[in-house]
Image: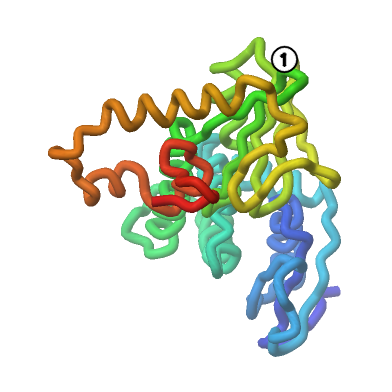
Amino acid sequence: MTRILSENTGYLYDGTFDGFLCVIFKAFEYRSEPAFILPQNRNTQMVLGDFIKVVTDPEKAKRVWHGLGNCTNQRNTRLVHVAFLSELPEVEMLMWRYLKKVFRDKSGRFYLNMLDDDVFELVQTARKVKKEVHRFHGFIRFQKTADGMYFAPIDPDHNILRLLAPHFKSRFPRQKWVIYDTRRNYGLYYDCSMVREIILDDHKINFHSGNLAKEVKDLDEDYYCSLWKHYYDAVNILERKNHRQMKNFMPKRYWKYLPEKNKPGGTTG
Protein backbone atom coordinates (compact mmCIF):
# COMPACT_ATOMS: atom_id res chain seq x y z
CA MET A 1 0.00 0.00 0.00
CA THR A 2 1.35 3.44 -0.94
CA ARG A 3 1.86 5.73 2.03
CA ILE A 4 0.15 9.12 1.66
CA LEU A 5 2.37 12.00 2.74
CA SER A 6 1.60 15.68 3.19
CA GLU A 7 3.08 18.23 0.79
CA ASN A 8 5.45 19.51 3.50
CA THR A 9 6.96 16.13 4.33
CA GLY A 10 10.73 15.96 4.14
CA TYR A 11 13.42 13.37 4.77
CA LEU A 12 16.25 13.19 7.28
CA TYR A 13 19.17 10.79 6.71
CA ASP A 14 22.51 9.99 8.34
CA GLY A 15 24.60 12.17 6.00
CA THR A 16 26.23 9.28 4.12
CA PHE A 17 25.91 8.67 0.40
CA ASP A 18 24.23 5.31 1.06
CA GLY A 19 21.80 7.09 3.36
CA PHE A 20 20.95 9.58 0.63
CA LEU A 21 20.36 6.75 -1.88
CA CYS A 22 17.94 5.24 0.64
CA VAL A 23 16.05 8.55 0.68
CA ILE A 24 15.70 8.27 -3.11
CA PHE A 25 14.42 4.71 -2.68
CA LYS A 26 11.82 5.84 -0.11
CA ALA A 27 10.67 8.82 -2.15
CA PHE A 28 9.96 6.56 -5.13
CA GLU A 29 8.37 3.95 -2.88
CA TYR A 30 5.99 6.54 -1.39
CA ARG A 31 5.60 8.33 -4.75
CA SER A 32 6.21 11.58 -2.92
CA GLU A 33 7.91 14.86 -3.74
CA PRO A 34 10.23 15.68 -0.79
CA ALA A 35 9.79 19.14 0.69
CA PHE A 36 13.41 18.91 1.84
CA ILE A 37 16.22 16.37 2.28
CA LEU A 38 18.64 17.04 5.13
CA PRO A 39 21.39 15.16 6.96
CA GLN A 40 20.53 14.62 10.62
CA ASN A 41 23.68 16.38 11.85
CA ARG A 42 22.34 19.71 10.58
CA ASN A 43 20.18 21.82 12.86
CA THR A 44 16.68 20.45 12.26
CA GLN A 45 14.95 22.63 14.85
CA MET A 46 14.07 25.17 12.16
CA VAL A 47 12.57 22.56 9.85
CA LEU A 48 8.93 23.34 8.99
CA GLY A 49 6.56 20.49 8.26
CA ASP A 50 6.64 16.75 8.86
CA PHE A 51 9.70 14.64 8.22
CA ILE A 52 10.65 10.98 7.94
CA LYS A 53 13.90 9.64 9.37
CA VAL A 54 15.32 7.23 6.82
CA VAL A 55 17.37 4.31 8.13
CA THR A 56 20.32 3.43 5.92
CA ASP A 57 19.89 0.04 4.28
CA PRO A 58 22.90 -1.05 2.16
CA GLU A 59 20.71 -3.32 0.00
CA LYS A 60 18.31 -0.51 -0.90
CA ALA A 61 21.22 1.84 -1.55
CA LYS A 62 22.77 -0.78 -3.84
CA ARG A 63 19.52 -1.13 -5.80
CA VAL A 64 19.37 2.62 -6.45
CA TRP A 65 23.07 2.71 -7.38
CA HIS A 66 22.77 -0.18 -9.82
CA GLY A 67 19.60 1.36 -11.25
CA LEU A 68 21.46 4.59 -11.91
CA GLY A 69 24.23 2.68 -13.66
CA ASN A 70 21.69 0.93 -15.87
CA CYS A 71 20.11 4.28 -16.83
CA THR A 72 23.42 6.03 -17.53
CA ASN A 73 26.98 4.70 -17.30
CA GLN A 74 29.82 4.23 -14.81
CA ARG A 75 31.29 7.66 -15.50
CA ASN A 76 28.00 9.37 -14.71
CA THR A 77 27.47 7.43 -11.49
CA ARG A 78 30.88 8.66 -10.31
CA LEU A 79 29.84 12.20 -11.25
CA VAL A 80 26.73 11.91 -9.08
CA HIS A 81 28.81 10.72 -6.11
CA VAL A 82 31.32 13.56 -6.56
CA ALA A 83 28.51 16.13 -6.67
CA PHE A 84 27.14 14.72 -3.40
CA LEU A 85 30.55 15.29 -1.74
CA SER A 86 30.23 19.03 -2.40
CA GLU A 87 28.05 19.35 0.73
CA LEU A 88 26.62 22.53 -0.78
CA PRO A 89 23.26 23.80 0.52
CA GLU A 90 20.35 22.16 -1.31
CA VAL A 91 22.63 19.69 -3.12
CA GLU A 92 20.37 16.83 -2.01
CA MET A 93 17.33 18.47 -3.59
CA LEU A 94 19.28 19.12 -6.79
CA MET A 95 20.28 15.47 -6.91
CA TRP A 96 16.70 14.36 -6.22
CA ARG A 97 15.42 16.39 -9.19
CA TYR A 98 18.23 15.07 -11.36
CA LEU A 99 17.79 11.42 -10.39
CA LYS A 100 14.01 11.61 -10.72
CA LYS A 101 14.41 12.74 -14.33
CA VAL A 102 17.09 10.14 -15.06
CA PHE A 103 15.00 7.24 -13.74
CA ARG A 104 11.84 8.36 -15.53
CA ASP A 105 13.53 8.91 -18.89
CA LYS A 106 13.19 5.96 -21.25
CA SER A 107 15.88 6.95 -23.75
CA GLY A 108 18.81 6.31 -21.38
CA ARG A 109 20.46 9.52 -22.58
CA PHE A 110 18.86 12.21 -20.42
CA TYR A 111 22.05 12.67 -18.37
CA LEU A 112 23.70 14.06 -21.54
CA ASN A 113 21.15 16.88 -21.86
CA MET A 114 23.19 19.90 -20.78
CA LEU A 115 20.28 22.18 -21.74
CA ASP A 116 18.41 20.89 -18.70
CA ASP A 117 19.01 23.15 -15.71
CA ASP A 118 19.47 20.29 -13.23
CA VAL A 119 21.87 18.36 -15.45
CA PHE A 120 23.93 21.49 -16.00
CA GLU A 121 23.97 22.41 -12.30
CA LEU A 122 24.93 18.90 -11.20
CA VAL A 123 27.82 18.77 -13.66
CA GLN A 124 29.03 22.21 -12.52
CA THR A 125 28.81 21.13 -8.87
CA ALA A 126 30.92 18.04 -9.55
CA ARG A 127 33.47 20.20 -11.38
CA LYS A 128 33.85 22.43 -8.31
CA VAL A 129 34.67 19.38 -6.21
CA LYS A 130 37.13 18.01 -8.77
CA LYS A 131 38.82 21.40 -9.02
CA GLU A 132 39.40 21.45 -5.28
CA VAL A 133 40.78 17.89 -5.38
CA HIS A 134 43.27 18.99 -8.05
CA ARG A 135 44.30 22.02 -5.99
CA PHE A 136 44.94 19.94 -2.88
CA HIS A 137 47.27 17.68 -4.82
CA GLY A 138 49.65 20.64 -4.62
CA PHE A 139 48.49 22.43 -1.45
CA ILE A 140 49.04 19.63 1.08
CA ARG A 141 52.09 20.01 3.33
CA PHE A 142 53.25 17.03 5.41
CA GLN A 143 54.96 17.20 8.80
CA LYS A 144 57.16 14.35 9.97
CA THR A 145 56.32 12.85 13.36
CA ALA A 146 58.71 11.39 15.92
CA ASP A 147 57.77 7.83 14.90
CA GLY A 148 58.54 8.46 11.22
CA MET A 149 55.02 9.00 9.94
CA TYR A 150 53.97 12.01 7.86
CA PHE A 151 50.94 14.06 8.91
CA ALA A 152 49.04 16.70 6.91
CA PRO A 153 45.99 18.69 8.07
CA ILE A 154 43.50 20.03 5.51
CA ASP A 155 40.38 22.20 5.74
CA PRO A 156 38.65 21.86 2.34
CA ASP A 157 35.35 23.44 1.35
CA HIS A 158 34.07 20.07 0.10
CA ASN A 159 34.30 16.56 1.55
CA ILE A 160 37.15 15.53 -0.75
CA LEU A 161 39.34 13.48 1.60
CA ARG A 162 38.52 10.07 0.08
CA LEU A 163 39.08 11.46 -3.42
CA LEU A 164 42.64 12.46 -2.45
CA ALA A 165 43.67 8.96 -1.36
CA PRO A 166 44.55 7.43 -4.78
CA HIS A 167 46.92 10.30 -5.67
CA PHE A 168 48.90 10.23 -2.42
CA LYS A 169 48.93 6.45 -2.20
CA SER A 170 50.50 6.40 -5.65
CA ARG A 171 52.87 9.29 -4.94
CA PHE A 172 54.13 7.97 -1.58
CA PRO A 173 53.70 4.18 -1.79
CA ARG A 174 56.46 3.35 0.74
CA GLN A 175 55.70 6.08 3.24
CA LYS A 176 53.21 6.02 6.11
CA TRP A 177 51.00 9.09 6.14
CA VAL A 178 47.86 10.62 7.60
CA ILE A 179 45.79 13.28 5.86
CA TYR A 180 43.31 14.75 8.34
CA ASP A 181 40.24 16.88 7.60
CA THR A 182 40.07 19.17 10.64
CA ARG A 183 36.68 20.60 9.63
CA ARG A 184 34.95 17.19 9.51
CA ASN A 185 37.19 15.60 12.16
CA TYR A 186 38.25 12.44 10.37
CA GLY A 187 41.29 11.36 8.42
CA LEU A 188 42.87 8.74 6.20
CA TYR A 189 45.79 6.63 7.41
CA TYR A 190 48.03 4.82 4.90
CA ASP A 191 50.26 2.09 6.36
CA CYS A 192 52.15 1.31 3.11
CA SER A 193 49.61 -1.35 2.15
CA MET A 194 46.07 -0.02 2.60
CA VAL A 195 44.17 3.18 3.39
CA ARG A 196 41.64 3.32 6.21
CA GLU A 197 39.59 6.00 7.93
CA ILE A 198 40.53 7.20 11.42
CA ILE A 199 39.31 9.70 14.02
CA LEU A 200 41.87 11.29 16.34
CA ASP A 201 40.29 11.64 19.77
CA ASP A 202 43.33 12.32 21.94
CA HIS A 203 45.49 14.18 19.45
CA LYS A 204 48.46 16.52 19.72
CA ILE A 205 47.48 18.81 16.85
CA ASN A 206 46.58 22.47 16.86
CA PHE A 207 43.59 22.49 14.48
CA HIS A 208 43.87 26.28 14.15
CA SER A 209 47.48 26.35 12.92
CA GLY A 210 47.80 22.72 11.83
CA ASN A 211 51.04 22.34 13.79
CA LEU A 212 51.94 19.18 15.65
CA ALA A 213 52.86 19.47 19.32
CA LYS A 214 56.60 19.59 19.93
CA GLU A 215 56.66 16.25 21.76
CA VAL A 216 55.27 14.33 18.77
CA LYS A 217 57.29 16.11 16.06
CA ASP A 218 60.42 14.74 14.47
CA LEU A 219 63.48 16.58 15.83
CA ASP A 220 64.36 17.94 12.38
CA GLU A 221 60.83 18.98 11.37
CA ASP A 222 61.11 22.63 12.44
CA TYR A 223 64.45 22.88 10.65
CA TYR A 224 63.02 21.58 7.37
CA CYS A 225 59.99 23.83 7.74
CA SER A 226 62.33 26.80 8.13
CA LEU A 227 64.26 25.72 5.01
CA TRP A 228 61.01 25.56 3.06
CA LYS A 229 60.09 29.11 4.13
CA HIS A 230 63.57 30.39 3.19
CA TYR A 231 63.28 28.71 -0.21
CA TYR A 232 59.86 30.29 -0.78
CA ASP A 233 61.23 33.73 0.15
CA ALA A 234 64.31 33.23 -2.03
CA VAL A 235 62.37 32.44 -5.22
CA ASN A 236 59.89 35.25 -4.57
CA ILE A 237 60.74 38.28 -6.72
CA LEU A 238 59.29 41.32 -4.95
CA GLU A 239 59.39 43.51 -8.06
CA ARG A 240 57.24 41.03 -9.94
CA LYS A 241 54.82 40.18 -7.14
CA ASN A 242 51.26 39.93 -8.43
CA HIS A 243 48.83 39.34 -5.56
CA ARG A 244 45.81 38.96 -7.83
CA GLN A 245 47.41 36.24 -9.93
CA MET A 246 48.80 34.50 -6.83
CA LYS A 247 45.32 34.34 -5.28
CA ASN A 248 43.91 32.96 -8.54
CA PHE A 249 46.33 30.04 -8.41
CA MET A 250 46.36 29.74 -4.59
CA PRO A 251 43.10 31.13 -3.12
CA LYS A 252 43.56 32.66 0.32
CA ARG A 253 41.10 30.24 1.95
CA TYR A 254 43.70 27.48 1.35
CA TRP A 255 46.60 29.29 3.07
CA LYS A 256 45.63 28.10 6.55
CA TYR A 257 48.06 25.15 6.71
CA LEU A 258 50.74 26.32 4.25
CA PRO A 259 54.02 26.92 6.13
CA GLU A 260 55.26 29.32 3.44
CA LYS A 261 52.27 31.58 4.14
CA ASN A 262 52.30 31.26 7.93
CA LYS A 263 53.69 34.14 9.92
CA PRO A 264 54.89 33.76 13.51
CA GLY A 265 51.94 33.17 15.84
CA GLY A 266 49.99 31.06 13.34
CA THR A 267 48.60 33.92 11.23
CA THR A 268 48.72 34.09 7.45
CA GLY A 269 49.58 36.94 5.19
Question: Where residue 165 sits in the image (x, y, percent)?
Answer: 61, 29
Residue 93, above or below 145: below
Question: Where residue 242 sits in the image (x, y, percent)?
Answer: 19, 45
Residue 240, quarter of picture = top left
Residue 163, above or below 245: above
**Quarter the N terminus occupies:** bottom right
Q: Residues within 10 Å of mark 1 (few under 14, many from 20)?
A: few
Question: Where residue 66 sits in the image (x, y, percent)?
Answer: 68, 42
Q: Please indicate, yes or no, whether residue 70 appears anywhere in the rendered image.
A: no
Left or right: residue 167 versus residue 206 is: left
Residue in view at x 71 percent, y 43 percent = 205
Residue in view at x 35 percent, y 30 percent = 232
Left or right: residue 24 versus residue 123 is: right
Left or right: residue 248 versus residue 146 is: left
Task: Give the residue number, with chain letter if any, for mark 1.
Answer: 192
Residue in view at x 76 percent, y 64 percent = 13
Residue in view at x 22 percent, y 51 percent = 244
Counting labels gives: 1
Which residue is situated farthest in the top direction here?
174
Which residue is situated farthest in the left direction here?
239
